[in-house]
Image: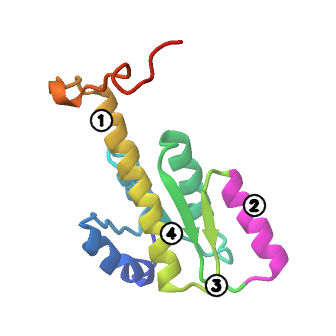
């Protein structure tokens, strides 16, 4: 995750530990980009401040989504914006590739549930890909299904 304080990491530390997932935290977008593009299941949470004049968070979203489209990117902000500003900011982040954009009220359970769901899906995809490219194993004779024995013969 890339954030400008420890708040976001503190919200997810227990969930990551419970699932034995690695939680990397950085304040530098370049480091977050390197972490997100590593060949492992990844969910990137980007803490953003829409009121700041720096486009670092949005640039990070665009860069990660361009280089690693399988990485789920979630933009999280604790800024209180008007509905119009929230909609515009959300649309921009989604256009750049973010999967979710969260604004207050932010509750730990929402962050945990969303992150756990995305990470679980990423792990499953990675395992499915690994299974698809690994050589098939020989099946024991008892594992074969004979459809003719089950009454499913060709008609």
Pair 1/2: label in front: 1
Question: Which stretch did the figure color magenta?
Answer: 81-95
Name the quarter where the C terminus is drawn. top right
User: Left of 68 or right of it: where is 19?
Assistant: left
- Residue denoted by label 3: 104
Earlier-in-chain disc, 1 versus 3? 3
Q: Nearer the viewer, residue 37 or 127?
A: 127
Image position of 23 with respect to 36: above or below:
below
Residue 13 spot, x, y in % from top left: 32, 78
Based on the picture, tell me whether residue 146 belongs to the magenta stretch. Answer: no
In front of the other: 68 or 128: 128
Residue drawn at point x = 68 percent, y = 78 percent: 51
- The residue under label 2 is 91
| Mark 2 element type | helix
- Horizontal side of residue 14 vs 60, given as left or right: left
> Which residue in the protein does label 1 denote?
130
């Amino acid at each position: 995750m890339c954030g400008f304080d420890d708040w976001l990491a503190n919200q997810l530390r227990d969930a990551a530990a419970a699932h034995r997932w690695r939680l990397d935290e950085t304040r530098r977008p370049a480091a977050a980009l390197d972490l997100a593009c590593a060949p492992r299941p990844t969910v990137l949470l980007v803490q953003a401040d829409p009121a700041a004049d720096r486009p670092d968070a949005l640039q990070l979203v665009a860069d990660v989504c361009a280089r690693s489209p399988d990485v789920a990117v979630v933009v999280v902000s604790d800024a209180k914006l008007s509905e119009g500003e929230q909609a515009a900011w959300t649309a921009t982040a989604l256009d750049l590739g973010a999967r979710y954009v969260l604004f207050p009220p932010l509750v730990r359970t929402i962050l945990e549930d969303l992150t756990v769901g995305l990470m679980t899906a990423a792990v499953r995809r990675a395992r499915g890909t690994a299974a698809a490219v690994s050589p098939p194993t020989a099946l024991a004779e008892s594992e074969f299904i004979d459809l003719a024995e089950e009454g499913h013969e060709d008609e």
